[in-house]
């Protein structure tokens, strides 16, 4: 079975990637806006990342012990991330968010988690509560998205609407004594936070001393070198990282305040307070080397300005084409990561996305693929490898796709 999400579940097998392009086994070339679901912000097979990895391979591929690349990468994350006093590595974004929740529960000595409807935090049981609910329940009642999730999980998760500070505040005020943490994607899927939402969430969680967790698996090092915390100016207590920090290799991290993170240190906690967190490939030296090489490129002058400029050209062009064709649609997101919803209504939270015309989106995506544009059913990931020629070709593909759905 495959692991690829393409329009209409079309059979699609990739053979290689270089820069902004991917190539299938039949030799067809595509401009890639999936980018490995986000990690390849520099593009595929970036020469400096490949060179760094190749030079590291003959020094050993894994140790299950502290190693220089992972320590250097942790130091770089601490320098970059406002909330990061300490860092702990794991191998996937799913595990990083799961570990953040466990860390918060141990710190607060509470069990209940508040998350946001439509928010995606990986594939663990807590994440798969109302991340894409098949029915809409009254807040804060959760709904499992998958079979196999223990019923007891339902008793430990509360659901709030993203971008609705009033309802969220009411839920927190009613349940603050049960809450271990609030976890949020500061940029939920492709939905930016409404003005004041993250600030208000930070204020109410701080008031009740509830750890605030940012899931920065997607936004980390994408919206700026300091991620969403830098971009939106709101600092959580704990954050989960993945994708970009591994440079295309399996790597993720938990970062947070020392007061909370010290639970991982067996020498500073009693056995009853210590959280064991181990993984065979956590802090893998090859993945850490790729991550360091990637972050080195992202620190170069003008990099984020270039990334945002490319994304802005694509977003504005798509919006203009849809408006001229008088197609009800909204292009939503930030410049490095955006999508289109075929609706006239404002899109602020999960429920407002449900009014989007999915049939039109499928036809739009299918047309793009025929024109050599590769992406997932949702999201355009912009990379530093996308150049002016790619932008021109993509805008031409947008034009044809808009014409096909008019």
Image (cartoon, rainbow, N blue to C red):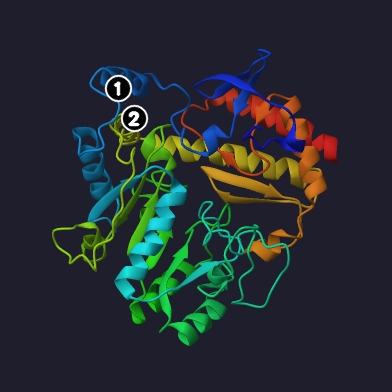
Residue at left offset 65%, top offset 44%: 378
Query: Where in the figure is residue 365, as x and y percent of width and height?
Result: 74, 37
Residue sitting farthest toward the top: 27
Query: Where in the figure is residue 262, as x and y percent of width and height?
Result: 21, 61
Residue at left offset 82%, top offset 46%: 359
- Residue 353 against residue 201 in the figure, above or below: above
- Residue 35 against residue 82 in the figure, above or below: above
Residue sitting farthest toward the bottom: 174
Residue at left offset 30%, top offset 22%: 52
Name the residue that disc number 2 marks.
290
Question: Taking the image as drawn, is residue 157 in sight?
Answer: yes
**Label 1 neighbour load within 10 Å: few <14, some 14-19, many 20+:** some
As rendered, which of 135 and 52 lies closer to the eye? 135
As rendered, which of 26 and 148 lies closer to the eye? 148
Contact between marks 1 and 2 (CB within 8 A): the answer is yes
As rendered, which of 334 and 381 lies closer to the eye? 381
Residue 52 has which mark? Answer: 1
Give the image quarter of residue 134: bottom right
């Amino acid at each position: 079975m495959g692991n690829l999400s393409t329009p209409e579940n079309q059979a699609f097998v990739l053979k290689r990637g270089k820069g902004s392009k991917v190539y299938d086994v039949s030799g067809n070339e595509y401009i890639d806006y999936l980018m490995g679901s986000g990690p390849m912000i520099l593009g595929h097979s970036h020469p400096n990342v490949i060179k760094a990895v190749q030079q590291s391979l003959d020094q050993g591929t894994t140790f299950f012990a502290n190693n220089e690349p992972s320590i250097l990468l942790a130091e770089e994350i601490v320098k970059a991330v406002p909330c990061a006093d300490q860092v702990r590595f794991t191998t996937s974004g799913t595990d990083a968010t799961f570990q953040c929740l466990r860390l918060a529960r141990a710190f607060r000595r509470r069990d209940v988690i508040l998350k946001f409807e439509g928010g995606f935090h990986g594939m663990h049981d807590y994440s798969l509560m109302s991340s894409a609910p098949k029915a809409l329940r009254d807040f804060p009642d959760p709904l499992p998205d998958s079979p196999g999730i223990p019923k007891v999980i339902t008793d430990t998760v509360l659901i709030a609407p993203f971008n609705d500070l009033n309802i969220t505040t009411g839920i927190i005020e009613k349940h603050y004594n049960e809450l271990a943490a609030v976890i949020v994607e500061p940029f939920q899927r492709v939905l930016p936070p409404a003005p004041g939402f993250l600030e208000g969430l930070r204020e109410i969680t701080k008031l009740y001393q509830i750890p605030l967790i940012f899931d920065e698996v997607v936004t980390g090092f994408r919206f700026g070198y300091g991620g969403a915390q830098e971009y939106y100016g709101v600092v959580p207590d704990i954050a989960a990282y993945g994708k970009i920090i591994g440079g295309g290799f399996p790597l993720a991290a938990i970062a947070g305040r020392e007061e909370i993170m010290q639970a991982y240190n067996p020498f500073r906690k009693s056995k009853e307070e210590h959280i064991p967190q181990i993984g065979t490939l956590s802090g893998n030296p090859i993945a850490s080397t790729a991550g360091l090489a990637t972050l080195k490129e992202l620190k170069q002058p003008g990099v984020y300005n270039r990334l945002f400029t490319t994304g802005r050209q694509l977003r504005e062009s798509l919006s203009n084409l849809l408006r001229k064709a008088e197609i009800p649609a909204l292009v939503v997101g930030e410049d490095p990561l955006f999508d289109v919803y075929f609706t006239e209504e404002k899109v602020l939270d999960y429920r407002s996305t449900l009014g989007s015309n999915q049939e039109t989106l499928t036809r739009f995506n299918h047309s793009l693929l025929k024109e050599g544009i590769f992406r997932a059913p949702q999201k355009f990931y912009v990379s530093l490898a996308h150049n002016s020629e790619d932008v021109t070709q993509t805008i031409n593909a947008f034009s044809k796709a808009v014409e096909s759905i008019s």
